[in-house]
Every structure is written in C-alpha cells, then in structure tokens.
Image (cartoon, rainbow, N blue to C red):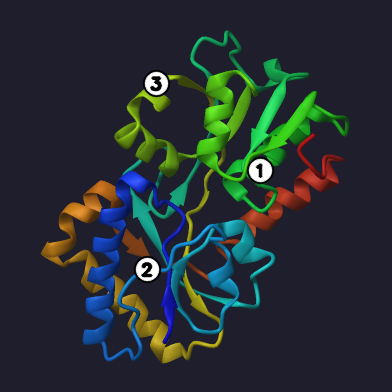
Amino acid sequence: MSIASLPMYDLPEAAAATDAWWQAIARAMRREGIADVPERLLRGEDYMAPWARPDLRFSQSCGYPFTHKYRDLLAYVATPHYSAEGCDGAGYRSFIVVRSDDPVQALADLRGRRCAVNGTHSHSGYNILRAMLAPLARGAPFFSEVKVTGGHKPSMKLVIEGAADVAAVDGVTLALVARYRPQMRAALRTIAQSPLAPGLPYVTTSGTAPDVVSRLRQSLVSALQDPAAKEAREQLLIKDIEVLKDSAYAVIDKFETDAIAAGYPEVR
C-alpha cells in the first residue's frame, strides 16, 4: 500500500482541515484511475521520512530538502498558491520576527543577539535567513548564539519567552498561527520580509511514471473544484495550484551559493 503525507502546514488545530483536503485529493485521484491511493495521511515525528520511501504517492516538501537531500528521490507535481501575507502566486516569503516589545527596527540591529532556527534543512527558517544576513555579517559571526529548535512554532515560542531574540518564519505558517493561535502571533512583530521564493511543492516519489504525475496534477485541479473541500481549503489558505518550470526552484540553491560566496556558509 502506498503512503501520503501533508506535513508542512499541519498544525494540530488544522488537522481536520488537512484530512479533508487530502480526502478531496484522494477522491480525485481515484477518478483519474490512479491505483493504490492511501485512505488516510501518514503522520509522525520524522515528517521527512516519507520523502525517501519508494511507496510515496503524494506529499508536500520544503523547497530546500527538495533541491538538496531528496533531489533524486522526489518528483515535482505542482505548487499551491496561498492567501497569506507575503505570498504572490506560487511564491512565498519568510518574515523575520522579534518579540512585540523588542525595540529593534531592522535585521542589522540584531547583531550580537540570539537566533532561533527551525533546522539547517529549511529554506524559510534557515537558508533565506543566511542569505539575508550574509551582506551584514561580512564573513564574521553575526549572532552570539544560534539555537536549533526543530520547527517554526518552537522557534516562535523561544522568541516569545525571551530565550531567543529573532527567528525567520514561513509566511504561510505565520498566517495559520494568526488564525489558530492569535495570541502567539500578537506576541511577535515583523521587522523584515525575505525575497520571494517558490512555495512548498507537492511531490511524489521519483519512480512515478510521467503519465501518473500528469494525473496527480489533474487530481489537484479537480480537488480545488470540489465543493466538499471548500471549507478545508479556506481554513488551510489554499486558493490555487500552479505547475512551475523545472528551473523555478534553482533560486533556492542560488540563495545558498551567494551566501557561501560572501563568506557566510552558515547562520552564526
């Protein structure tokens, strides 16, 4: 039996909506004649583990793992559009956030402070922050401490509690937190937005036949038109999908290579 996962924006408060969105996609897949469609989503602590499995039917990946560790294991399907601040079509931005009562006004003001990052495998929480810091750091450490938290929400929590001073947070995550955890969002203030990058892609295993990939894309189009999924899509802020050019995600590599060339290979 194949597996499916949608881990990237799966807040506990939105789990029912995520399940309903998957059911709409699964129904459309079956109508497209796709075999072995999972009944329910696979969830677990290691949300990246399904991306390495040859029985993966469908998932959503962060752009950085998609272009790096899982480059040869995943096949691109499509990119969703989100109705969240900072999103533009299939593109999205990260927001650089501090505590709401922190007087800093710009990223440069945070030199020598403490940073929370979700993980070095993340574009929105690490790769883009590195790119934004590189011109300021000029090859030297910028922060006094960098804490790896394992997720955007733990990073936000550290900043709110005062154990860190800044974090870069995916704009869609921030919009969902504003919807489901408004007090958490209100405790943070945005001081900068990142450049645009292609959004988190829907993917399948690289062994998937091209005709099946085409049918997966059509399934997404059909799911978007499914009235039974309308409320779930609105709760998840999903408004459309787009099939991007093969070269679209190369910008994620460029953010990394430019930072390395500037002498800032890691957030430090």
Dot 1 falls on a residue whose secondary structure is helix
Which residue position holds label 2?
Answer: 41
Q: What residue is at 16 percent from the left and 57 percent from the top?
A: 230
Distance between the Cα atoms at labels 2 and 3? 31 Å
Which residue position holds label 1?
Answer: 126
Residue 30 coordinates in the image, percent (x, y) = 25, 85
Distance between the Cα atoms at labels 3 and 1? 23 Å
Q: Amino acid at mark 3?
A: Ala
* Closest to the observer, 125 or 76: 125
Q: Residues within 10 Å of mark 3 (few under 14, many from 20)?
A: few
Question: Tag on residue 186?
Answer: 3
* Quarter of image, res 43: bottom left
Q: What residue is at 69 percent from the left and 15 percent from the top?
A: 109
* Quarter of image, res 168: top right
Q: Amino acid at mark 2?
A: Leu
Q: Residues within 10 Å of mark 1 (few under 14, many from 20)?
A: many
Task: Say whether residue 204 is visible.
Answer: yes
- Frontmost of labels 3 and 1 is 3
Q: What residue is at 57 percent from the left and 79 percent from the top?
A: 53
